[in-house]
């Protein structure tokens, strides 16, 4: 920052004086005694930091030639911005007024009771105080002669700041910030500073350590318990590893069973396939398809084996940590694992029981089929898609025939009951007619009674004819139902003849074809 213009309206011997010819470097004012050099220095001090009061006892340089007491300075910053600092004693009690001159867009807001201008001036002066400016930057001969002016703490801090190269931040500001930070960290007798809180926690921890050291018996008991729990954890971990390995092996076998069965079927078909000189129509495509399926199954089997090997290697590399930090949480976790392992073992036992039961059911079914039926013949049984569709069609036809037969039998029973009821009614009507004939009124009876008896007889006779006709209709319905039943029976026998095996054998084979061929797939078998 430098001064580019000085304007004095009234100060000491100067009146309406304007100086603009300041060089960019150093400007030297030369003149004889009483020429006004000290007056110019006092004017610059007064404009920047305020004029001395009348009670201060210093020379205030009252205007000798008239004019208003005060003037202005134009300050230019390193970035080129210029500000006019004006101070007149008669205005606002001699407070400074700062106006931006260049660039013009840097207009300042309206001053707030003069406070804004003073704060801006302090920023322009980089926080330099009046005493520092007077003793370091603008000192007179009398102040130079007095060395005690350099002993103040403010000047010492400023000189020390310049010597340390800390920039524009005074050492006093840095020292105040450090003292404030020190007060936040530690304060004698305080509670909120961080170090005070840490010391308080340290004291509490020390008290707790002394209390724990006073309990050696409990400490030894806890140590013994800790050692016992370590041994239990090792034991449970070994059992868990053993059970986990068994479960992993069984799960791997179960996942690979279906692919293994398919592989065995394909290999068996390849071995049993006869050698022919010429492939049937589409034989090459079918062979290629089977080879691709076989290769896919073998690849999946190899992948499964590699995955099992990797899992075993990773498991062998695992090193469990036996160091217990929170015993209760670890024991609870091990207990949960034990419960899960027990549940998995129960599931495995249940699977074995179900497999044995289904094996027994399969043996019974094979025994009912005959001595010639065994696992090998069952595996050779043609279970292709066309055969399955044909068996499903036969099963549906059998179900429909069986349902129709049941319905026909129900209708036959209903017709028989209706026939029996009508026959009973016919017998009762005949008895009634015979009774009426035997009790026909004699000639001496009144004519009206005889006419009424005749009408009643005709009514009964009409009902008898209707009942006989209904009886004939029921007999015809019964004949139709018998024909339907015979037709259903013939259809069942025809279905039996198509397969060339007994009906009960056909129904059992339906269940075997629809259900999976393995032991675990017999849950959907229906034995009729």
Image (cartoon, rainbow, N blue to C red):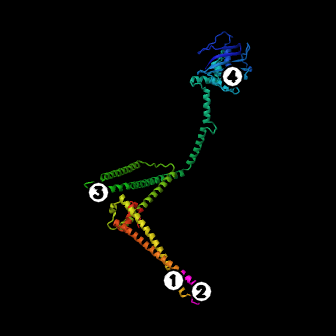
Above or below, 255 against 137 in this view is below
Q: At x 29% / y 57%, what residue is drawn?
A: 273
Q: Quick one: label 4, few (<14), some, or many (20+) residues within 10 Å? A: many
Q: Earlier in the sequence, mark 2 or mark 4?
A: 4
Q: Nearer the viewer, mark 4 or mark 1?
A: 1
Residue 270 place in picture, x, y as percent: 30, 55
Q: Earlier in the sequence, mark 3 or mark 2?
A: 3
Quarter of the picture containing the C terminus is: bottom left
* Left or right position of 364 against 44: left
List the residue tagged with mark 1: 430
Q: Is label 3 in a helix, a strand or a loop?
A: loop
User: Can you tell which mark lies on residue 447?
Assistant: 2
Give the residue at the far left of this rendering.
277
Q: Picture quarter containing residue 141?
A: top right
Part of the protein shown in magenta: 441-459
Give the residue at the far top of this rendering.
32
Q: CA distance from mark 4 to mark 1?
A: 145 Å
């Amino acid at each position: 920052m430098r001064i580019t213009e000085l304007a004095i309206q009234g100060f000491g011997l100067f009146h309406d004086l304007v100086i603009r010819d300041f060089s960019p470097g150093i400007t030297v004012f030369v003149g004889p005694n009483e020429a006004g050099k000290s007056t110019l220095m006092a004017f610059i001090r007064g404009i920047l930091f305020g004029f001395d009061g009348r009670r201060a006892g210093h020379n205030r340089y009252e205007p000798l030639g008239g004019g208003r007491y005060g003037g202005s300075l134009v300050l230019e910053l390193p970035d080129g911005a210029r500000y006019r600092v004006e101070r007149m004693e008669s205005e606002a009690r001699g407070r400074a007024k700062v106006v931006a001159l260049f660039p013009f867009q840097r207009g300042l807001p309206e001053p707030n009771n003069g406070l804004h201008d003073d704060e801006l001036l302090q920023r322009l002066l980089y926080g330099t105080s009046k005493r520092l400016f007077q003793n370091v930057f603008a000192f007179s001969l009398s102040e130079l002669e007095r060395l005690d002016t350099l002993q103040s703490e403010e000047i010492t801090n400023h000189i020390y700041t310049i010597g340390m190269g800390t920039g524009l931040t005074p050492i006093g500001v840095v020292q105040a910030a450090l003292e404030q930070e020190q007060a936040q960290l530690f304060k004698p007798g305080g509670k909120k500073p961080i170090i005070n809180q840490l010391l308080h926690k340290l004291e509490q921890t020390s008290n707790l350590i002394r209390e724990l050291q006073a309990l050696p018996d409990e400490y030894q008991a806890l140590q013994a318990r800790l050692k016992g729990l370590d041994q239990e954890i090792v034991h449970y971990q070994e059992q868990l590893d053993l059970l986990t390995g068994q479960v992993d092996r069984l799960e791997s076998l179960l996942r690979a069973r279906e692919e293994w069965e398919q592989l065995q079927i394909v290999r068996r078909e390849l071995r049993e396939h006869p050698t022919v000189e010429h492939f049937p129509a589409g034989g090459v495509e079918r062979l290629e398809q089977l080879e691709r399926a076989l290769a896919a199954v073998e690849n999946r089997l190899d992948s499964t084996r590699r995955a099992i090997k990797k899992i075993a290697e990773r498991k062998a590399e695992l090193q469990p940590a036996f160091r217990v930090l929170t015993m209760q949480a670890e024991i609870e976790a091990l207990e949960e694992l034990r419960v899960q392992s027990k549940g998995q073992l129960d599931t495995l036992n249940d699977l074995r029981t179900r497999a044995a039961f289904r094996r027994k059911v399969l043996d019974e079914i094979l025994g009912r089929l005959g001595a010639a039926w065994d696992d090998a013949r069952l595996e050779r049984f043609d279970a292709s898609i066309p055969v399955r569709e044909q068996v499903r069609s036969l099963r549906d036809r059998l179900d429909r025939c069986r349902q129709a037969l049941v319905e026909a039998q129900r209708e036959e029973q209903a017709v028989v009951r209706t026939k029996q009821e009508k026959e009973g009614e016919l017998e009762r009507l005949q008895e009634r007619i015979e009774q009426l004939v035997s009790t026909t009124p004699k000639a001496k009876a009144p004519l009206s009674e005889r006419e009424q008896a005749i009408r009643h007889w005709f009514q009964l006779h009409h009902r008898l004819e209707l009942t006989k006709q209904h009886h004939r209709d029921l007999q015809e319905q019964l004949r139709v139902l018998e024909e339907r039943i015979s037709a259903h029976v013939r259809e069942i026998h025809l279905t039996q003849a198509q397969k060339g095996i007994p009906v009960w054998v056909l129904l059992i084979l339906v269940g075997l074809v629809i259900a999976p061929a393995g032991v675990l797939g017999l849950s959907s078998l229906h034995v009729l």
